[in-house]
C-alpha cells in the first residue's frame, strides 16, 4: 500500500462549499495553494462529496437526485459544475491542471454503487455482471441517499475494480471514502475489498476513511487498509468540539505511524460555509486556531484546510505557514498527553513528543476560559537538567532550568522544541 | 376503528407457500374453509407477502425484482400468479370469490412505497405529488428489498390513502402489515399515519402488525392503532419456539381486550413449506399441537392456519374444529399464568381465565420431555369447594374435590372448564 | 407453607415511628384496631425495624449501636422501649396482649445474624457452632448496619432455626424480613434457607419480603417461598410515587394468587413521621388516598396502615372501613389494567377484575392534575349489554347502557361493581 | 509527593507465601537481594497482606480472625510470625535490618480500619475520637474480611494520620494499599484522603494501589495521588494472563511518567506458592518469562519479584540481572505498541520506545504458539536509514538495512536498542 511519510496536507472543498463546489472554485484554490503554500508542504486538492450531483447547492443532499453516471454505472462529474469533464473526460482535465501546478488531486467517494445504476441495472465494465448483482439491497447510508452497499463477491469486486480503474485513468491521487469508517464491524468486508481494489488499480492513492468516530478496537485494521481515518464526527468551528478533541486525541495519538494517521478532520479556518452566506468566517478565535494547529500537528493528524484560501487574512496565512509548527507535524514521534489537570485554576493539558531528528516537543494548552499563568516543573516531564527551548509560534528562544513558566491565553496554546 | 369481538381466525399462505402462493392455491383453501371450517368460526383467507412479485418461487426474496405496480406506483397482483387480476382488476375478482363463499379476504403489505415506484417517480393518485416526495431514502426494511419508508407529510399520507382506497375497492377485509411492529419507536409516526389512512378508507379492515417480537412498553399504542400484533418473530414447528412462547404469552396475555389481540403467529400444522418439498409436514407432535392450540386459545391469540388445508388429516381437522376449545378462544377473559414450577420432576405450567359466560378455564401444560402425573391442589387456584370440570379436548366430565390429578403426555396439555 | 386466603391487613409502626416505636404506642394501636377495625378484617399489628436497638430515636440507624441480643446471639427487644420484655421474656407478653384482643402479632427482622453476635462469637443454640461460623464476612446490608448475611450450611441453618424457634415461642404470627427481596439472585440461597426454617418452626407465620422493587423475573420464586413481596422501594405520601405505582401494579397484578401477594407497601395515612414532628400528617389529598386504596384493593396488595391510628379523622376512618372496597380487596381475581390513555385531555387508567362471587369490578383513575369528565364505552371493556353498577365509594347504584360517563377529581378514582 | 525517577524494583512476599510470610523468610530474601541484586537496582522488600494475622497459613483469609492491633486500633505485626516486633516495636527492627543492607522496606495495608477495632471502639491516637466514628458500616472489601472503610471526615483522617505516623516511625518506605484501585469512583474520596495522610506523614513513601484492573478514565487521578497502580487483577504464571496483558499494556503505556507507573503486577518466577507445596515452581516457560520481562521493562511497569529468591536458578538470575534490559526499564520513554498483526502465520506484536539518552528501543513478541521467522520492514517503524542494533537478551550487535529478520520462539520475545 502507498504509505506517505508525512500525514497528508491539503485543501478540501467541504467546509466551504458543501456538496456544491464548482470547477472554478477548485481551480482557484489549487492555484492559490501552488503560489502560496506548496513550498510549505501543502499538496492535496480534494473535491468533496457529490461532484456527480448536478443539482447540489449546499451542504444538504437531494433524495433520489438524478446523479451523473457513465454507461457502466460509475459516478462521473456533473458537467454543469465541472465543464472540463464534458465529453466523458471525467476529472482528467482538472487533475491534469492540478498536477501541472505541482500538486496532487483527490476526490470523495461514497461506499457503494449508485442506486440509480442498480435500478437501471447497468453493466459492470469488462464483465458479464450487472449492477443488480453487485448491490446489497439492505445496505444503505443513513445520511446520504445515493448508494447501495456492494456485495462481497466477484460482481462487487469487479465494480470496485472498475471505479478505481477509472479514477486512476483520471490521475486521482487521493480517495476520501465516506460511510465506511465507523460502520465497522458491519461493513468490514466491504472496506477490505474496497481497499484491495484501490491498491490493485496501478496508481498510488491515499485512502482516507470517513466519517468518525472511528472505533478504537479496530485500530489495527485501519492501519492495514488505509492511510488515515477520522477519529471524530464532522468537526466544525466550535470550542466544544475542539475541547472534546483532546480526549479523542489522547486515545488515538499512539496509533499514528508509518504512513497511517488518525485524522482529527479538516481545519475550518477563514471563509467557510460560503454556500449559505458569503460573509461566513470561522467562529474560532485566533487562540483557538493556534490550539487546533498545535494539537493536530503534535499528534500528526492530516492537515486539510477547509476554508476558501483566496480569502485568507494574514493571521490565517501565518497559522498554516509556520515552518516550525509544520516541522513538528512532520517530525513528531510517539506523541502523547502527559497530564491534564487544574493548575492554579486553569485546566492545563500537556503533550510531549520526540522529534525524529532528536530533541523533544512539548505543547501546553490552556483549556480554561481565562488567560492564565502556568507553572510546570521540568521534572514533571522527566527532564532533570536545564534545557534550551524555542517556542514555535513566536520563535522566541530561552532556557528553562527548573520550571516552565508561561502565560497562555484562554483556549490558547504554546509549543516548544527542546534541544 | 373496526373492532372484531373475537380474535381473528383464518388461513394464511406463508407457512405453506412463502412468497409464491398462486390464485389456484388460495381458491382451493378458501373453498375448503367454506365447506369444512366456516361453521366453526374460521373466516379470513389471507394472501401473504409479495403477491406483486411475478418471479417469486419460495420463502426467499429476489433483490431488485421488477415487481408489479400500477400507474400510481401501487403494488398490484402479478397476473402470472393471479390470472383473475388481469386487465387491472387487482384482487377484486378473488375477493369477490371469497366473499361469495361467506368468507373474508385479506392481503399482506409491506410498510412503505415500492422502490421502483420511487426511482420511476410515479404520480400519487389524485394529487400533484410524486413517489419521490413520499419516500424516505434512508428508511428500508432490512430483510425485504421492495420498499422505502413513507414520509410523515402530505405526500406520504396521500400515498397511504391511495393504496387503502384501492384495497377497499377490491373488497379487502384484512391487512397484515409487515416491517412495522417491532420497529417502534423508530417508525412510530409511520404506523400511526398508516393506521389513520386505513381507518379512513371507508371499509372495515382488520389491521395486523408484523413481525415481532412487539415491544411490551408500546402495548397501549398497539391497542389504539391495530387489532393484532405479533409478540414473536416468525413461529415455526419447533418445540423450542413453542416452549419459548410461554414466557411471551405470560407477559402479553393481559393485553388482549376489546378488539385487540397479542398475536402468537400462525399455526404451522399439516402440509407446510410446500415450495421446497411436497412431502413436508409439520414437525410438531400431536401433543405439541394440542399444547399450541390450548395456549393460543386461552390467551385469545388470533388463530391463523398455516398449512395447506386440503391435505389435513383427521387429527389436524380435530385440532381446529373442537368446539369447546374454540369456545374458550371466544369466551376467555383475563387469562394469565398462575404458576410455572417443577411438580414431581415435570415442569408444570398452569393458566386460568374467566369465561364471559361465567365459570372458569384452567389449562395445564406439561413442558417437560416425559409423560407425567400431575397433582395440583384446587386451593392453589383459589378454589375452595368441589367443582364440576369438563376436559375440553376429550369432553370428559367429572368432579374435583380437593385436587386435580391428571396424567399429561410430554409436551402435552389439558384444558378444563369449571362451572 | 401458611397461605392466607386474603392479602394481609394490619398496622405497621414504620411510617409513623421509624426505628423508634415503643411498647406503649404498639399497645394503643392494637387496642384501637381491636375496637374499631377488627370487624372489617384488619388483624395484624407489626413492630417494624430495630426493636432491639435501645438508642433508636427516629427513622435513622446508629452505626455500630450496641443492640440487644440474648446469650445465643439472637436479637431481643430493648427493654427500655418494650418494658414487658424484661427478664428475658422477649415479645411474648406483648404478643399475648395482642392475641387477647383477637388480633395477630408481627415483627420485622433483618436478613442475617447480628454483627455484634459474630464479633463476640456467641454460641448457636442447641449446637456446638458459634456465630462466626454462621456469618458471611462480606455479606452486609448497604443501608442498615446491624447484620452479616448467614452461610448456606449447617451453622447458618441452625442460626435461622434458632431465631424462628424463639419467635414462635413468643407467639409471632407475621415476619417482615428486610434486605432480602430485591437482593436476588445474589441472596437467593439465603432466602430459601430462611423460608424453610420459618416453615419448620411449628407455628404459622406470614412471611413478608422487603424492600423492593422485587424482580419480575423472580415472580415464581417469591410465590413459592413467601406470602408477600414488595414491588416498590419505600412508598411515601407523594403523588409521584403513587403515580409510578400504576406501572409497577400493571406488571405485577397477575402474580397475586393463592396466599401470595405483590405488595405495594404501607398506606401512609393520618399522622405519620411522628418521630420528627407531632404535627406531621399525610401529604396525600383525599382523592389521592382514594386512588391508593382503590388500586391496592383491586390488585389485592396487602393493606398495612402506616399512620398513628388513634389520631385518625373521619375521612381516614371512612377510607379504611368501606365494606365494599374491602370486599373488592377480598374477592378480586385476575385483576389487570385494561388501558391507559388520554381521554379528552385526562390521563385515564382503567382496571378490571372478576369477583370470585361472580360479577366484575372496574376501577377508573384520573391520573391527570385536573378534574375531568370521562366517557368510556362499555364495549371497550368487552361488555355488550346494559349493566347494573354500584360505585363502591359512594354506594350509588345505577345502570350503564352503552357508556360509563363519570366525573372524577384530579388524582382521584372511582370503583364499580357490575353484577 | 515522593516521585521515584525509576519504576520501583523489589521483592514482594505474596506470590510465594500468600498471607503467611514470616520474618525469617523476609530476612533471607532481603539478604539475598542485598548480596546479589542490589547492584542492579533492586531495592524494595515488601511484606504483603495480613502480617497482623497470627493464624494466617496460606493465600486464604480466615473470616473474623483475631488480628493484632495496638491500643489505638492500628494493625501491628503478629509476634508469632515476626518475633522482632515483640514489645510493641512493630516493624521497626525488621525495617532497620533491611535498611542496614542498603535496601528499602515496604508493607501492605488494606483500605480502612480493622473491624475488631471498631467493635471494640478503640480510641484514635491523639484525638478524642474513637474507631466507631471513623468507620463506615456499609463499606467493606468483598474479598478480605478485616476492615471497614473510613469516613471522609475529621475522625477518619485522624485514623489515617495515626497509621502513617506509626509506619513512618517504623521506617516504612513503601505502602501497597489494597481494595482501593479499581474501587473508583465509589471510594475516590477515601483514596484522596489516604494519599494526603501519607504525604503528610513526614517520610517519603511510595504509594502503590491494588488490585486492578484500574479504570482508564481515572488515569489522571492515579497519577496525582499515587506512584503506581495495578492495571490487572492478580497476575499469575499462566500464558492466558500474559497474553491478555498486551492489550492492557497498549492502553496504559502512555500513562507512565514522572514518578508514576501503570503496574502490570508481580513477576511470578522461580519458587512460588510455597505455602501449598515446596516443589511449586513457576509454570511459565523460559521464553514466556523473557516476554514478560521485555514487556514490563519497555512499558516501565514496576518490577516486583514474586518468587523465593534463594531458590532461583541461573536462568532466573539471568532474567533479572540483564543490565541492558534493566537499562531499558530505566530509560524507556513514550513506549507504545506499533502494531499487532499476523505475519506469516504468527501473531506479531511490536513495541517501540525512545531512550532518554537518545536512540530507540524496539521489542518484538511472537504471541503465537509456534516458533517463527519474522520479517519487519524498518520503514514500518518509520526508520528510513540503516541502523546499528543490539539485541538486549543476547547482547549481539549487527546492522539492519531494510528489514529486521528474526527468528523468535513460541511465546518469546526479542528487544533491540537502535543507536
Image (cartoon, coloured by chain):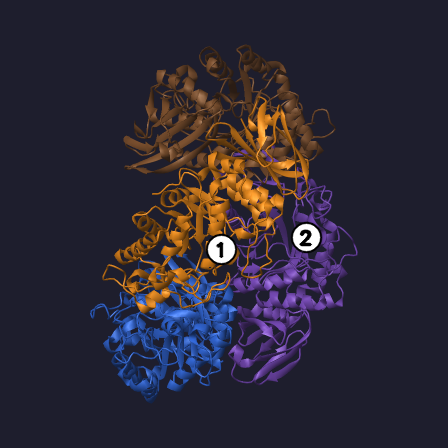
Chain colours: A brown, B purple, C blue, D orange
> Residue D123's quadrant in the figure?
bottom left
Is residue B350 placed above or below D20 in the rendered structure?
below
- The spot of residue C33 in percent (x, y) is 30, 82
Query: Which part of the image, by quadrant, shows the C terminus of chain C?
Result: bottom left
Q: Is residue D273 above or below residue B352?
A: above
Disc ID at residue C16: none
Q: Residues within 10 Å of mark 2 (few under 14, many from 20)?
A: many
- Mark 2 — residue? B14
* Badge count: 2
Q: x and y percent of residue C117 in the render? A: 38, 74
- In the image, residue C194 above or below residue B74: below
Q: Label 2 vs label 1: CA separation?
A: 66 Å
In this view, the residue farthest toward the right is B279
Query: Residue drawn 37% across and 69% down?
Result: C265
Q: Chain of mark 2?
A: B
Residue assigned mark 1: D14
Residue at 71%, 33% (x, y): give it. Answer: A154
**Image location of residue C254, percent across then percent down:** 49, 69
List the single residue furthest toward the bottom.
C100
Q: Secondary structure at mark 1?
A: helix
In this view of the protein, can residue C269 be seen by the observer?
A: no
Viewer-closest of C299 and D83: D83
Name the chain letter of the residue that bears numbered label 1.
D
**Mark 2 secondary-structure assignment:** helix
Residue D246, x across and y down, in percent: 55, 42
Amino acid at each position: 500500500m502507498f504509505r506517505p511519510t508525512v500525514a497528508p496536507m491539503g485543501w478540501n472543498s467541504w467546509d466551504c462549499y458543501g456538496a456544491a463546489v464548482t470547477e472554478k472554485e477548485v481551480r482557484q484554490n489549487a492555484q492559490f495553494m501552488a503560489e502560496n503554500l506548496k513550498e510549505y508542504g501543502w499538496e492535496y486538492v480534494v473535491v468533496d462529496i457529490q461532484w456527480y450531483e448536478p443539482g447540489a447547492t449546499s451542504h444538504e443532499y437531494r433524495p433520489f437526485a438524478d446523479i451523473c453516471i457513465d454507461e457502466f454505472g460509475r459516478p462521473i462529474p456533473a458537467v454543469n459544475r465541472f465543464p472540463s469533464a464534458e465529453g466523458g473526460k471525467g476529472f482528467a482535465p482538472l487533475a491534469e491542471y492540478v498536477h501541472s501546478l505541482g500538486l496532487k488531486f483527490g476526490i470523495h467517494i461514497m461506499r457503494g454503487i449508485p442506486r440509480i445504476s442498480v435500478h437501471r441495472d447497468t453493466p459492470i465494465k469488462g464483465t458479464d455482471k450487472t449492477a443488480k448483482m453487485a448491490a446489497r439491497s439492505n445496505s444503505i447510508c443513513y445520511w446520504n441517499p445515493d448508494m447501495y452497499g456492494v456485495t462481497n463477491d466477484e460482481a462487487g469486486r469487479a465494480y470496485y475494480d472498475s471505479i478505481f480503474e477509472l479514477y486512476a485513468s483520471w490521475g486521482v491521487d487521493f480517495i476520501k471514502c465516506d460511510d465506511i469508517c465507523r460502520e465497522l464491524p458491519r461493513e468490514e468486508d466491504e472496506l477490505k475489498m474496497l481497499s484491495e481494489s484501490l491498491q490493485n488499480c496501478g496508481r498510488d492513492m491515499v485512502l482516507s476513511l470517513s466519517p468518525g468516530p472511528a472505533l478504537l478496537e479496530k485500530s489495527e485494521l485501519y492501519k492495514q487498509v488505509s492511510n488515515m481515518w477520522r477519529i471524530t464526527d464532522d468537526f466544525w468551528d466550535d470550542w466544544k468540539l475542539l475541547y472534546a478533541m483532546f480526549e479523542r486525541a489522547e486515545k488515538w495519538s499512539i496509533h499514528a505511524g508509518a504512513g497511517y494517521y488518525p485524522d482529527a478532520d479538516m481545519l475550518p479556518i477563514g471563509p467557510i460555509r460560503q454556500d449559505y452566506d458569503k460573509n461566513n468566517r470561522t467562529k474560532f478565535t485566533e487562540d483557538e486556531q493556534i490550539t487546533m494547529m498545535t494539537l493536530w500537528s503534535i499528534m500528526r493528524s492530516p492537515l486539510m484546510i477547509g476554508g476558501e484560501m483566496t480569502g485568507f487574512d494574514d493571521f490565517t496565512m501565518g497559522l498554516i505557514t509556520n515552518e516550525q509548527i509544520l516541522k513538528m507535524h512532520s517530525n513528531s514521534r510517539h506523541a502523547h498527553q502527559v497530564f491534564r489537570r487544574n493548575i492554579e485554576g486553569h485546566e492545563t493539558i500537556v503533550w510531549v513528543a520526540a522529534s525524529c531528528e532528536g530533541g523533544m516537543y512539548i505543547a501546553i494548552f490552556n483549556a480554561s476560559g481565562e488567560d492564565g499563568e502556568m507553572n510546570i516543573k521540568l521534572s514533571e516531564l522527566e527532564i532533570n537538567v536545564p534545557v534550551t527551548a524555542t517556542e514555535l509560534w513566536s520563535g522566541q528562544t530561552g532556557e528553562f532550568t527548573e520550571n516552565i513558566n508561561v502565560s497562555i491565553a484562554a483556549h490558547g496554546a504554546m509549543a516548544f522544541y527542546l534541544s
